[in-house]
Image (cartoon, helix red, strand yellow):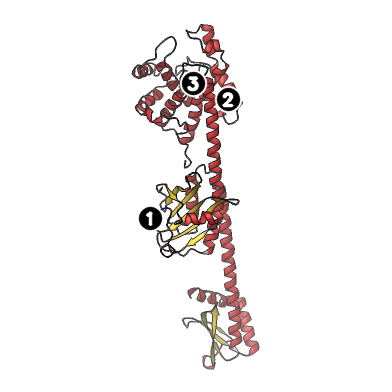
Amino acid sequence: MKNNRIILKKILSNKESLDILNNTAEGLNTSAVITDINGDILANIGNLDPEAAAGSFPLNIKGEKAGSAVGNKNAQVIASMINYMLAAEYNKRDLIDEVSNSYKEINLFYDFTEKILDCNSVSDIVLLTLSLIKSFIKVDTVSIMLKNDETNWIDVISAYDCDEKTVKNSIMPFNGESIAEFVMLSGNAEIINDISIDGWTAPSGGKTGSMMCAPLKIKNRVIGAINIATENISEFTSSDLKLFTILSHNAAVCVENVRLYKDLKEIFMSTVYALAETIEMRDNYTGNHTKRVMEYSCAIGETLGMEKDALEVLRLSAILHDIGKIGVRDDVLLKPSKLTNEEFALMKKHPVFGEEILRKIKGLEHVVPGVKHHHERHDGRGYPDGLKEDEIELNAKIISVADTFDAMTLDSPYRKGLDSKTAIDELIKYSGTQFDAKIVDAFIRAFPYIDMHKSNNIFKIGDDLNG
């Protein structure tokens, strides 16, 4: 009602509108006083003498009263003209709102499309989806569920509450009770404005009043669903559902890309690890040396506080640190006795051979420094380039400590390996000369906990689907 008064007042304050109304009143030899719904006078068309008023004609906007035109019987024409102007103004405002909303939607999804390309985990996708949903719908929780064709359960793989805190992930059976299951089977989005009446269960648990659920669909294949919920009963609209469905389609594409990327990454890592193990099999005495160096290196990296992406590079570098040994002759690599100076000179070339191999493989250029320089020394007396101190890349320093520790504790044809305590004492002895003291210190701090890194799962560190 307040808006009706504002719209009426706006029309009557417009000079062109008033001129049209006054000219019409003059032509009809009539006049009218225009009042709002409170009876306040907004305009006097044709300078009506109040005592000459003979009737009152309603002014309406979409069936709601906005005011009155008081005058003689011809004042009805004035009232009709004002009603026409009110309808035109109302429709214009509707059109402006529609254009504004469309512009907002376009910006929203442009922003979503641009940002979602940077998401490399499903958790990132859920957080981004939550932030965008909250910009146009009041929502308390959002969760993404994926179909698990192997178990025939629904994996609630990522959920957040309104404060963007992670809700414990869970699994749900296909038991016909969840709205997510219904949406996955039908492939159509649904609005549940009162969950207590409709009887559905909420995937995220807790108190839920209303929900909207949309399928995560790739072409005609449903891979899961996305659910948003409010604690209290809400009135989700068809416009809300339309926006939510479009957003869920974009999220589905990105979720599938993340899953495919994870699959490719695992295949890539398996291939790399198999390659490293194949090379290691040439030497029967090393016995999982590559795996242990990787575990030691990653433990050091985590102790140093390295970020997930940096740990991934470190892990690859450690796995491939001895790949250059493929270029070393068997009579040197597998020699059961101590190497001659000439043979050792050939063995010292394996980091360079490793660099030459890896530079030819697209996507592995970033691991080259760790592979090439893991035999450099802090005092500059290492090989192949005689680098020292900060000239040596961090990964190379880490692998140097891990590699040396494993070599010292490994039995060889011509000596028995050292026990862990003695090997650590050796690292401390050469800390600051052969090794960077900070790396040795990190290894010593990490060593009591390294057992938790030892597993057959080479993808352990930072490599789950949720990121």
User: In this view of the protein, which residue sits in the foreground, 376 or 294?
Assistant: 294
Is the residue 22 above or below the residue 448 in the image? Answer: below
Q: Is residue 82 above or below residue 99?
A: below
Q: Nearer the viewer, residue 319 or 155?
A: 155
How many C-alpha atoms fall within 10 Å of the one at disc 2: few (<14), some, or many (≥20)? Answer: many
Q: Is residue 435 left or right of residue 355?
A: left
Q: Secondary structure at mark 2?
A: helix
When asked about the image quadrant of residue 103, the answer is bottom right
Residue 391 visible in rendering: yes
Residue under label 1, please give it. Answer: 206
Q: SS for tag 1?
A: loop
Which picture quadrant has residue 451? Answer: top left
The amino acid type, in three-letter code, at marker 2 is: Leu
Q: CA distance from mark 3 to mark 1?
A: 53 Å
Q: Which residue is mark 2?
A: 358
Q: Which residue is mark 3?
A: 374
Compare residues 154 and 256 and report the one nearer the observer. Answer: 154
Separation of disc 1 and disc 2 at Cα? 52 Å
Tell me the residue at 52%/13% (across/down).
333
